[in-house]
Image: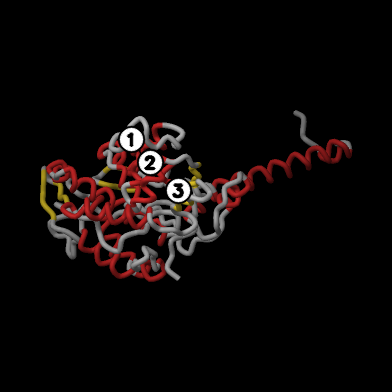
């Protein structure tokens, strides 16, 4: 039997072996760091399903086939939190909201165990506001569970790839939209699934992009009230007008002298959603480079003054999409 003897190795072989051991340890450490740095934040754990004996429930419950479900989401709790912690500009006091985390968890609890049969009986408007409110509430929850948000290895990597990510930004949370799974009506949902597979596909309402908020300054402002079934059209109109007519650097501006129209990149990223409900005539909005952009320009023209609307419809100009501001939408 041959026994490994270090002393019998040549100096060159010893150096090679030591180098291999060091390299292996370095790869192992880097792998652990990368795994930690690039792991998505976890959604809060849920308590057990409600029972008949559960006390202090956030909403009414009922039984079906031996299991208890919430009959409706606890929107009264969410309404109170939005009014308390979101200002008129749509900015959030995350530090104070974090102190009310248990109340936000109560709302989450109510949608996690909401009865899907009750949901199916709702009107289309009620279902849409349910998902808009859920998206915004779950975004708030993931922010306060990682607050304060600072720079991260993931964010540094994003900056290295050319994306300008501020230190305090939801973009510093790895894969937060794609891989952080919440529970809604007993099923796993990511924020991306709620936005792209549910809200966009099922309701085909382009103004939802003015309502859902990704905790960033570049987003339309977060309302300090919930969206409601019988107010949703009015609320979406208010949101759209507020967002489009905001002349801040990251929002819209029509520069007639420079013959340039500046728009939020949201209207570029999701421009395809505007086609079905915004179909310009063949001779109008010819400055749009394609059907999607022409539809966006028609949509925008409905919210500006008559002079600007005429400019968008008939003049020749360039369309420029602003850089997106990923800074956290935090109240000063």
The residue pinned by badge 3 equals 263
Q: Which corner quadrant of the image does residue 269 belong to?
A: top left
Q: Which of marks 1 and 3 is in front?
A: 1
- The answer to the question of whether label 1 and label 3 lie on touching residues, with beta carbons closer than 8 A, is no
Marks 2/3: CA distance? 15 Å
The residue pinned by badge 2 equals 313
The structure's colour scheme is: secondary structure
Q: Position of residue 204 (x, y in %)?
A: 28, 38
Marks 2/1: CA distance? 9 Å
Q: Where is residue 93 in the image (x, y as percent from the top left)?
A: 39, 68
**221 lies above or below 293:** below
Secondary-structure class at tag 2: helix
In the foreground, 101 or 16: 101
**143 lies above or below 28:** below
Q: First in sequence: mark 2 or mark 3?
A: 3
In the foreground, 24 or 265: 265
Marks 1/3: CA distance? 18 Å
Q: Judge from the rendering whether residue 41 lies leftward or rightward of residue 9; answer left or right.
A: left
What residue is rendered at 40% in x and 66% in y? 94
**3 lies above or below 69:** above
**Is disc 3 surrounded by few (<14), some (14 to 19) or many (20+) residues within 10 Å?**
many
Q: Quadrant of the N terminus?
A: top right
What residue is rendered at 63% in x and 44% in y? 28
- The answer to the question of whether label 2 and label 1 lie on touching residues, with beta carbons closer than 8 A, is yes
The residue pinned by badge 1 equals 280
Q: In which quarter of the image is the C terminus?
A: bottom left
Q: Judge whether residue 189 can be spotted in this image.
A: no
In the foreground, 312 or 139: 312
């Amino acid at each position: 039997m041959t026994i490994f003897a270090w002393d019998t190795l040549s100096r060159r072989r010893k150096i090679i072996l030591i180098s291999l051991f060091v390299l292996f340890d370095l790869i192992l450490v880097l792998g652990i760091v990368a795994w930690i740095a690039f792991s998505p934040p976890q959604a809060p754990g849920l308590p057990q399903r409600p029972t008949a004996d559960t006390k202090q429930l956030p909403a009414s419950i009922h039984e079906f086939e031996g299991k208890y479900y919430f009959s409706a989401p606890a929107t009264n709790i969410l309404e109170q939190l939005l009014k308390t912690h979101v200002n008129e500009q749509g900015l959030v006091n995350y530090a104070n909201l974090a102190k009310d985390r248990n109340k936000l968890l109560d709302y989450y609890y109510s949608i996690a165990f909401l009865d899907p049969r009750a949901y199916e009986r709702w009107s289309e408007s009620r279902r849409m506001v349910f998902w808009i409110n859920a998206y915004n509430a779950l975004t708030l929850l993931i922010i306060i569970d990682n607050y304060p948000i600072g720079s991260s290895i993931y964010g540094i990597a994003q900056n290295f790839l050319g994306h300008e990510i501020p230190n305090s930004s939801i973009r510093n949370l790895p894969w937060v939209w794609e891989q952080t799974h919440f529970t809604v009506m007993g099923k796993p949902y990511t924020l991306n699934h709620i936005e792209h597979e549910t809200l966009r596909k099922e309701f085909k309402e382009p103004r939802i992009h003015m309502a859902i908020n990704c905790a960033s300054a570049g987003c339309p402002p977060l309302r300090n009230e919930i969206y409601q079934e019988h107010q949703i059209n009015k609320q979406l109109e208010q949101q759209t007008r507020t967002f489009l007519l905001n002349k801040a650097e990251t929002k819209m501006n029509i520069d007639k002298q420079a013959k340039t129209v500046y728009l939020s990149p949201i209207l570029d990223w999701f421009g395809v959603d505007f086609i079905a409900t915004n179909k310009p005539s063949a001779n109008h909005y010819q400055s749009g480079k394609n059907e999607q952009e022409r539809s966006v320009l028609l949509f925008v023209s409905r919210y500006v003054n008559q002079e600007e609307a005429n400019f968008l419809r008939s003049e020749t100009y360039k369309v420029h999409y602003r850089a997106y501001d990923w800074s956290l939408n935090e109240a000063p």
